[in-house]
Amino acid sequence: MPKPMKRYLSHYGWNFNKAACEYAVSKMWKEDAQGNKKKIEQKTKEQVYELLRKHGIELKHDELYNATYAWHMVMADYFGVSVDDERHAALSVKAIIDDPDKPGGNVFSHWYWDMIDFGHGVDFDEFLDD
């Protein structure tokens, strides 16, 4: 395991910090009916939590920026396919983060292994402050 990755995990565990979340979300896109790729609208953690509260959603197992990442993943991958509206997007985030089989949703490790599968390197130094 590379030293920067070890340092990141020692600070944040298998969770998104703000920098890692913003990086991951910046790479997300949605394909329209014509096959054009469009970046999804990036929301802050506060905006995501406001959307969750608006729909009566309270998360029990969120850590750092995991729910923020999950919101964007739902919007990029499922919105308009199996998720039809904002309320169901919020419910999907709740289902991911508060899954009793994997509290927290394992979204960071899932993202990391996706990066490896796609042959993309992850520069953990970019996500560390010090």
Image: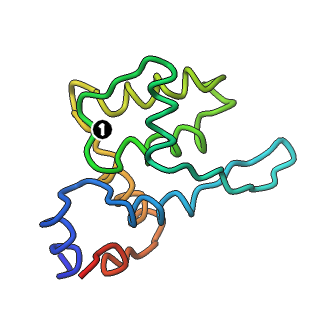
Which residue of the protein is positioned furthest toward the left in this rendering?
10
User: Measured along the vertical axis of the image, is residue 43 above or below residue 118?
Assistant: above
Which residue of the protein is positioned furthest toward the right in this rendering?
34
Q: Which quarter of the rendering shows the C terminus? A: bottom left
| Mark 1 surroundings: few (<14), some (14-19) or many (≥20) residues within 10 A | many
Q: Where, by quadrant of the figure, is residue 117 drawn?
A: bottom left
Left or right for 23, reference 103: right
| Residue at point 24%, 28% (across, down) | 60
Residue 59 image position (x, y, % from top left) = 31, 28
Left or right for 112, reference 72: left
Q: Amino acid at mark 1?
A: Gly
Near-viewer residue (5 or 45): 45
Dot 1 corresponds to which residue? 105
Left or right for 35, reference 12: right
Which residue of the protein is positioned furthest toward the top in this rendering?
56
User: Measured along the vertical axis of the image, is residue 43 above or below residue 117?
Assistant: above
Residue 75 image position (x, y, % from top left) = 59, 39
